[in-house]
Image (cartoon, rainbow, N blue to C red):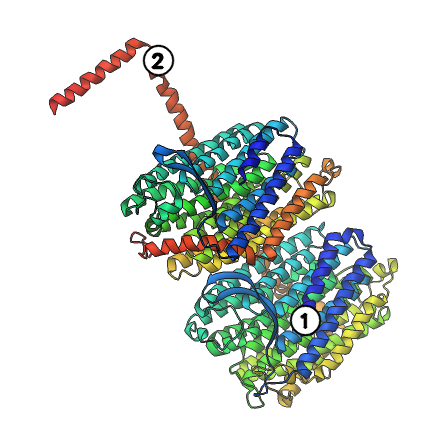
Amino acid sequence: MLLGLWLARDVKGVRAVMVAGSTALLVLAGYLTVTFLGDRAAGATDEMLYTASLNWFEPLHIKYSVGVDGISVAMLLLSAIIVFTGTFASWQLKPLTKEYFLWFTLLSLGVFGFFISVDMFAMFMFYEIALIPMYLLIGVWGSGKKEYAAMKLTLMLMGGSAFLMCGIFGIFYGAGGQTMNIVEIANHTGGAHAIDFAQQCIWFPLTFIGFGVLGALFPFHTWSPDGHASAPTAVSMLHAGVLMKLGGYGCFRIAMYLMPEATHELGWIFLILTGISVVYGAFSACVQTDLKYINAYSSVSHCGLVLFAILMLNQTSCTGAVLQMLSHGLMTALFFALIGMIYGRTHTRDIRELNGLMRIMPFLSVGYILAGLANLGLPGFSGFIAEMTIFVGSFQNADTFHRVLTIAACCSIVITAVYILRVVGKILYGTCTNEHHLQLTDATWDERFSVICLILAVAALGMAPLWVSDMINTGVAPIVDHIHATSHTVSTCNPFN
Amino acid sequence: MESTIFILLLPFLSFLLLGVFGKWFSHKAAGLIGTASLLAVAVLSYMTAYDYFFCTARTAEGVLPTLMPYNVHWLPFFAEGLSFDMGIMLDPISVMMLIVISTVSLMVHIYSFGYMHGERGFQRYYAFLSLFTMSMLGLVVATNIFQMYMFWELVGVSSYLLIGFYYTSPAAIAASKKAFIVTRFADLFFLIGILIYGYYCRSFGFEFDQAGFAQGAAMLPLALFLMFIGGAGKSAMFPLHIWLPDAMEGPTPVSALIHAATMVVAGVFQIARLFPLWIEYAPGTLHIVAWVGAFTAFYAAAVACCQSDIKRVLAFSTISQIAFMMVALGVCTEYTTGHHHVGSLGYMASMFHLFTHAMFKALLFLGAGCIIHAVHSNEMSAMGGLRKYMPITHITFLIACLAISGIPPFSGFFSKDEILTAAFAYMPAMGWIMTAIAAMTAFYMFRLYYGIFWGTENKELHAHHTPHEAPLTMTLPLVFLALVTCGAGFLPFGHFVSADGQLYDIHLDWDIAGTSIVIAVASIFLATYIYMGERQPKADALAEKFKGLHQWAYKRFYLDEVYQYITHRIIFAHISKPIAWFDRHIIDGFFDFLANGTHALSFRIRGFQSGSVQKYAFVFLLGTLALLTIMVLA
């Protein structure tokens, strides 16, 4: 459905096309959402709607099959918004504009492809498509130690994909080697049979870590601060906003959905790791001095919360996880956009060198405060509803192990407040002491437009969460039920139980 | 009752309008928009109150019904019985709070015309005031604990924004940050409390007759206690009070509205809202509330005696008075009303005191605002002898001082007397402690009063700039609040609010009332004796004599320093820094090591790929030999 658009667009690469393309994407995603909701309301009960399938590589049973459920619709909408605003945020990018947008588009192609794929292999391929442009975008258009950062990011993510590939083929053969289709494997149709328990225990960690690297799972998150810090604005936005969501989405859709027994058995290890991510990322963010580092660590903390929530294994927390993906995607994109704009003017991101920006660039400052407040979970913005859903969901697990982790995760909301307010107080408030900064101007129209769009999206999600939440739940519920239906065992190897 | 939705919508719309398009409005237009919407809110609140208290039929048991004109499903939680609803709930205490909030907020809106005249960011100021009013109103009419929490957070943010209104002043920035983080820390416990409550009782609602509570009974004391910690943060109970004195960096009308009359009583309101649960399931925990309240009341009163900044004195006085309300709730032992059931008198007394205190404390703060406006300083040393210059402020301030000291016929006397009666019924020791604190209250208030309006005039300062009475927009609210303070004590408050909703006539217990009047008058005389004269040799002598103690209290018992130490030294230096270091050097170092290691290794072994056939043949031969050997040996 979305395919024709990309192909037409890749050849050119000028702003007008970009705007037309991304607007079309946004409109299409909006249209998709509306029709999806309409069809669901009309009683469509299939797991995946609008499915289409194309034989691709017969011997390995690889098909290009697409389809969407509530989760992927939400993710597509998110990606469309971010690509749209990202286009405006990189409006003034000068050298090699055409090439830049080409790679940028390719990156979004990978992302969109990933979210609509139902075939494991196609999903993996789109995942790779999304990774490679990242290397070039950071390496060429980045700032600071860009080659190092680009290399590190690519190598770590590639390392993740190696795990992932093993995992995917493991699942494929473990389930009988007849189909790569996720729904078929999960439901044991189309020639697939249940993967036996011992095998699950091998492939589960591999796939989970493979996707977890992208989802900034502790201790595989270290590419994120360097990568974000060096990436150009729109790439940071797309990366933190959408690409990191691939991780959570993949963990949920492949690792957990296909291997429910192993999820029950080994989930606790990852739960501890994600719990660490949440608190650890927040504490690290408190002492950073580079704006982008602060945000990158904050992303580690928030994306940790996504993985944390899906491992809590109930409908509430998993819905919360998807909400958190949406909300974090929008908020971080907003944050990186603003940081990029501030950096573009002051040429520094060091919070010790910035102060009193409120008087000089009121629009950007107000935007920054709003982004900050959204990030620390101000009601009325999306962060609040996502976090609350996650916490309520996590709390439904009554044993001490889960309780302790939930409460630890709750603590992160206080630490978040500390680092956000620290930055706001330091760079925006006060009086400006740097004479060069006094002549700087406020945002231009394209920047304003992109910031306003993102703020509106964050606020809309925060004010009227009901329909999004319901839509996501239609996608989450079958998966969670599936995980619970096949296995009720309590983990035998968890020493904390 | 359908009109109640506008009580929330109007301030919200005015916030959006002023917040987004504020730049294009003149100061006057912005102020008028804010004030007009608040006027409408106040009128609607009074209409709702009239409707509710006088036109709504009581139930068969003589109880005012709980109405819910709106309640929508806002966010589903997909778990049994749990969802996040938004709505409006009217019951005696929420309607009472509507009156308090809209009245004080309206007065502050009018007052700010004069006080904030010509300030930069005037539109922003009114936008934030509207936001705050909306959030506070939303908090009190919440239909469930989660909605309450949501608006609770919003109130915290508006408070943050308003304290930091003068964003170029470092003190204001620090104060706003501190206020937000301290209350956020407390809110964490509130949130956990809510989660426990939701999990065990399978509901977030306020309908207390469900079977769910019985099954969650074992965990309810814990949940309620955690929520109380959240409330203690907002209501500045010891030891979470440290943000409130600093919050005085905000504009004075803001202090009057948020940090005296409305937001800081949210904690009290929260306990009152959940009162049926407290009394039923956690009476033991209620004792903790009482004693935390009593200690805070004493502590704050002691500090207030030694401060020299008039807003700080008022801030500590606020802490102390809110603690009175906490004590009143904490000393309740049963859930009935009537003359013989003093065990639940505290509930009514607490709400009554909340009502009267909001009025006279707002009056005090607004009066202080006029004074600061006139002399451009917060310090008492810049004041003295102001009664000649500012007659209206003087008289209204005196009325408020008499009210807070508990002198009849002003409102504070009646509500405080009910609290003392409840405290004596609970335990005579508690009664005497509270009486003593009431005496301290009278003492420090009159110390403040004499310091401002009597005493030595700072002629040097006044020569440059003669103090003058404030403009009409500022004195009008003072007069209005003073009138309320004179009359509010005679309200039959028990007819509106009581523990179980039954009609109840307030009656004075003259043994206790008499004692408290005598003691209050005595401490006023003591303050007069020490502070009224031109110079204050006695006060100086006293301060000299107990220098250590005086210094200790002046520095607020060094609690701020303790907190500073914990946050900066321990959390920043010993948790965050090492974690950041660990991340950069150990974890990241490990991956860098992997990459560099691979690089180095491939550098080493690339020699094997030499391209010379002889070498390959030689290695091939060696390999074959080795294989053969192994096969032979095996």
Residue named by callout 1: B4
**Mark count:** 2
Residue named by callout 2: B610
Q: Label 1 vs label 2: CA separation?
A: 87 Å
Q: Is residue B504 left or right of residue B31?
A: left
| Residue B17 in the image: above or below residue B425 | above
Q: Is residue B379 left or right of residue A398?
A: right
Tag 2 subunit: B
Please identify the quadrant where the N terminus of chain B is shown: bottom right
Q: Is residue B356 left or right of residue B474?
A: left
| Residue B355 quadrant | bottom right
Under circle 1, the secondary element is helix
Q: Residue at the spot x=12%, y=25% of the render?
A: B634
Under circle 2, the secondary element is loop
Q: How packed is label 2: few (under 14 Cα within 10 Å), some, or many (20 or more)? A: few
Q: Position of residue A111 (x, y in %)?
A: 51, 39
| Residue B158 quadrant | bottom right
Identified by mark 1, the residue type is Thr
Q: Which of the marked residues, 1 or 2, is nearer the chain's N terminus?
A: 1
Q: Position of residue B240 (x, y in %)?
A: 57, 63
| Residue B162 in the image: above or below residue B520 | above
Foreground of the two, B265 or A84: A84
Q: Residue at the spot x=44%, y=51% of the render?
A: A47
Identified by mark 2, the residue type is Ser
Tag 1 subunit: B
